[in-house]
Amino acid sequence: MTAERYTHGHHAAVLANHSARTAQNSAAFLLDRLQPGQRLLDVGCGPGTITVDLAALLDPGEVIGVDNVAGVLDKARAYATERGRRNVRFEQGDAYALPFDADSFDVVYAHQVLQHVARPVDALREMFRVLRPGGLVAVRDADYGTMIHAPTDPRIDLWLELYHTVARSNGGEPDAGRFLRAWVAEAGFVDAVTTATAWCYADADRTHEWGSQWASRVSEGAFADQAVASGASSVEEIGELSAAWTEWSTKPTAFFAFLHGEVLAAKP
């Protein structure tokens, strides 16, 4: 069985990026299917910003976030308290063995999760198990193969190639967005609605933030350790890739964009 490791780790720059996610910018494809009172499970909830937004929309329905890292769940709980959200809670758990009864949720949501697991169909089958008949699964994942940038820089091209290598050695599929429809069907869901949306960084504030975050994520987080330890890169090359992101972030015409695949489907 393929070993799994989380490519991004939980460096401060990673958590800063994840904490900027909201229901509006990360779950818009789901929002018009939600109704107050529904019970929702957020698999791989991270620091909980999306989860808490969803809880506000579903109040008085219960929303539960699950993640496999205790430390990030502490951040999620603190954020829920800060927002005064009482219909949300967070539990540690495994996407392959969710700690919930069968047929117990109206909606299961997973954002940027399936790209990091070695057995995405098995994870989806577990989401299927905990959904009630007629319940809805909503999954969204990036597709790194769609990433484009300007001004062109061969070092950023090399970073993208290296990212694919490291992510796949960790058991994941960085181009997951394009495969979601097939995975959801194989897991037994029906009536799938498949869409794609883009994240675009094309103004000074956003390009500076994106480039600065990746400069840190490349050189200081789990990605750097994994790339060097596996022999896929070197400390010197990692330094060059980080510098490329820093330089790109200051360019007045910098542009970066990529697609996410999104699927809504039902349990029959």
Image: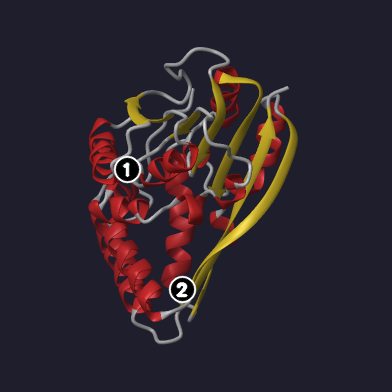
Return the disc, 2 or 1, that comes first in the chain's sequence. Answer: 1
Quadrant of the rendered image containing residue 3: top left
Q: Residue at x 23, y 55 (%)?
A: 220
Q: Amino acid at mark 2?
A: Pro
Q: Which residue is mark 2?
A: 154
| Left or right, residue 158 beside residue 28 | left
User: Mark 1 is on which residue type?
Assistant: Pro
Q: Nearer the viewer, mark 2 or mark 1?
A: 1
Element marked by disc 2: helix
Q: CA distance from mark 2 to mark 1?
A: 33 Å
Front-most of residues 11 and 26 = 26
Q: Measured from the top left, where is residue 236 in percent x and y?
A: 26, 63
Is residue 45 visible in the rendered image? The answer is yes
Is residue 216 or residue 46 the one in the foreground?
Answer: 46
Query: Is 180 left or right of 64, judged from the image as shown?
Result: right
Label 1 belongs to which residue?
Answer: 47
